[in-house]
Each structure stands twice: as structure tokens, then as C-alpha cells.
Amino acid sequence: MTGKVVISGMGVVSSLGYDLETFWKNLSEGKSGVRKISLFDASSCATRIAAEVPREFEEYSRSLIKKRAAGQMTRVTRMCLVAARQAVTMSGLDFDKEDKTRCAVIMGVVNTGNSSVEKDTSAQNTVFKSMTNSMPAWISLDYQLLGPNFAINTACASSAYAIAIGMQMIKNNTVDIVIAGGADSIINPEEINGFNALYALSVANDPPECASRPFTAKRDGFVIGEGAGVLILESEEHALKRNAGIQCELAGYAITSEGYNIMAPMRDGEGMAATIEKALQNAGVDKTEVDYINAHGTSTELNDRYETMAIKRVFGEQAYQIPVSSSKSMIGHTIGAAGAIEGIITVLSIKNDLMTPTINYTDPDPDLDLDYVPNVSREKKIGIALSNSFGFGGHNATLVFRKYAGN
């Protein structure tokens, strides 16, 4: 087993920006990326809002990717490739100087976005656009990487699983570098109508910016978001050898299955709590060391209630001293990309000693009584933080991040 695993680069595409600086600025200011849906006519849907990536991204992404390749990718796959390139650039990696057989790509992918909303799909490109392995494949092709290259689908925990498995591959000395993350979009009438039939989505369409309201009494379901998040994981030894700028340490993780229900989480947050406990054990972190939790925080009745109960189950009275906030209040639920995007937010929170808020927190649920960092960002020294991801099918993940010495 090798030593520490560190993060040397990050890239993000989201409703609040498609570069890291813009994204962090908007999050820190508590802005919402939720708007009326513009990708299709949603007037017949019960839910008519989503956190869409700005339309300008389409032209921007095509300017960065060769025309033939861009035509074989969905809009979502282009998001993934752009985020990966951002992360590689930030990391300072030159793959021509690396052993490419020891460079892996692992992406969390629920779907590729080749839905009724996708434009320019033809008989010649529909197979490439639909391949769930296309995202890691294109990244590997971009850098001619020869190591493991695959996609993971564990619903809303997919990209958190990708990060966790990437960490384990480095710890096992299988690879030196992992490009890990995910991308997703389910902003289309088929999936919106499907989730509406399950009463999972918010129908608070007006004003859109106020619809995602985790941990509040009036929460009525999650708001769909879209985007991509990618992190560069390395062994500390490898990063130091090339004088990389280390952003944070990935200290540990847990990935578990509840074996309980295809949709609902285990009652009273029992499965969530077990996941958090295992992650702390894996990281060798004492409960008293945790300074902040970036919650799964979907704005659904059961998730917010059970996640709160899980945190109390794990931390006891200390739970009331640990700030907990939900990024989904601003960027919506990005499904397969959520674990990676929210992991990036957690890293940025540690680096900047700043916790982003849970916006729209105007009507507290009396049963949910933790510190949810309401409405405005808050400065706090953060040494260790958790990021939770819990998905349909009972797929749970918790990632543990630690401030890197010298940061």
C-alpha cells in the first residue's frame, strides 16, 4: 500500500460557470443556477425548471474539440472532456513524461445525455453518443493514455465511487495518476416526467431560483442540474517528484450498499450513518476532527430527514457543532456528476476556509435542527471535511478530504 493520495487538479462545468474561478465565486456569493428550462419546451411538464449549463458553453466546447470528434459526442460528453482538460491543465501534468500505462481514467456516468433533447444525432453517430464508456474513452484518447479506463454507474453516487476506486487503485500501486469524476444531464421530458411520476422533483416553478430548498419545511423535491466535475488524483510521492501544486489530500472513503429499497433510503438514516462511520475509519480520522460536511442534501423529504439523523447518529452531540450545507440548493442535483462536483466544492472550501451556504433556507423544519449554513457563506478554518453522496438503489459514498500541509 502506498502513502497519501492527493489532488493536484480540478475542472468543473456547471450552471454557475464552466471554469473553476467563476464557479467558486458564484457559489461563494450564494447565487442560484436554477432557471426556466430552455433546452426544450417544458410547458406540458409538471416541473419546468432546472439548473442548466449556460448555452454559451456549446459554442465554447466545440471551439476546443476537433469538429469530427465533437460531432461524435453528446453535449454532456463535451462537458466531461472540457472539465478533464481543465483539471489536467491545473495539475501541470505532461503525459509525455509519464508512464502512460500507469495513468487511469474513471468516470461516473448514469447516461450520456443522448435523449430527445440532444441535437444532431444521426445513424452515423448515435452509437458513439450513447456509449456510457465514451466519456473515459475520449479522455484517454485525448492524452493517449494506456492504463485502466472505464465508467461506473451507481446512480447519484457514481462519480464519488469513481473517486473512491481511483484512490484505491493508487493505494494499491496499480497506477500513479487517476483522472476521476463524472458528467450528467437528465434535463429532458422523458426523465422529468418519470421523476415527476415518482413525486421526486420539485414543482415549485416560480420563482425557479427558490425551488431547491434543502432541510426546510417547504422542500418539495429535488431540482435537476447538469454538468461535469473532474479531479486529478496522484500518489503524494508522484506529485512531489514532479513539484505539482497539491490542492488537498483525499484521506479516505467508504462505498456501501444498503440492500434495502430501490428508491427510499434505509429508515432513520441507518445506512447513511454506517457509510460515514466506515469512511472515518478508512481515513483514520477521529469524529472530533471533522470541521464541515458537504451534504447530499437533495431537498427531498426523506433524504434531508435521514441524512440529518445519520449525522446525529454518527457524531452525537458534536453534530450540532459541525456546519452542514447543501450545494444542491444552488446548482441542483447533477446526478452522476454530483459526487465529483460536490467533492470539488469541498476541496475549495478547505483551501479557502470558506463554507458555501444552503440558500433558500427561510423556513426551517423544526425536526431538522443542525447548522445548515443558512443563506450566506461563512468563514471557518477547515482541516477535515466530508462529502456525502447517496443514490437510488442504495448506493452510498462518503469521501473524506484533509487540508494538505503547507496549503
Image: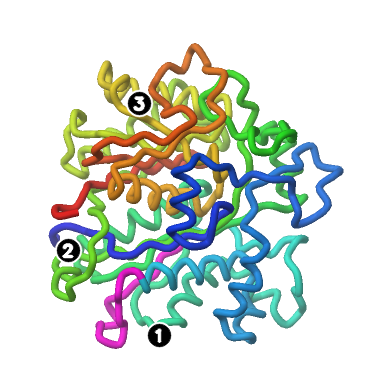
Q: Specify the amino acid type for callout 2.
A: Glu
Q: Position of residue 123 (x, y in %)?
A: 76, 79
Q: Which residues are magenta?
A: 90-107
Snapshot quadrant of residue 88: bottom left
Mark sitting earlier along the chain (1/2)? 1
Q: Secondary structure at mark 3?
A: helix
Q: Quick check: can you spot residue 182?
A: no
Which mark identifies residue 236? 2
**Residue at the spot of label 1:** 144
| Residue displayed at 50% across by 12% down | 366
Considering the image in quadrants, where does the N terminus appear?
A: bottom left
Estimate the spatial distance between the alpha carbons at disc 1 and disc 3, rounded to whole Å: 43 Å
Q: Residue furthest top?
A: 366
Q: Specify the amino acid type for callout 3.
A: Ile
Q: Specify the amino acid type for callout 1.
A: Gln
Estimate the spatial distance between the alpha carbons at disc 1 and disc 2, rounded to whole Å: 23 Å
Q: Quick check: can you spot residue 348?
A: yes
| Residue displayed at 52% across by 60% down | 13
Q: Position of residue 232 (x, y in %)?
A: 33, 65
| Residue displayed at 49% across by 75% down | 137
Q: Position of residue 307 (x, y in %)?
A: 43, 28
Q: Residue furthest right?
A: 44
Which mark identifies residue 311? 3
Assess disc 3: are there few (<14), some (14-19) or many (≥20) residues with their C-alpha within 10 Å of its C-alpha. Answer: many
Snapshot quadrant of residue 112: bottom right
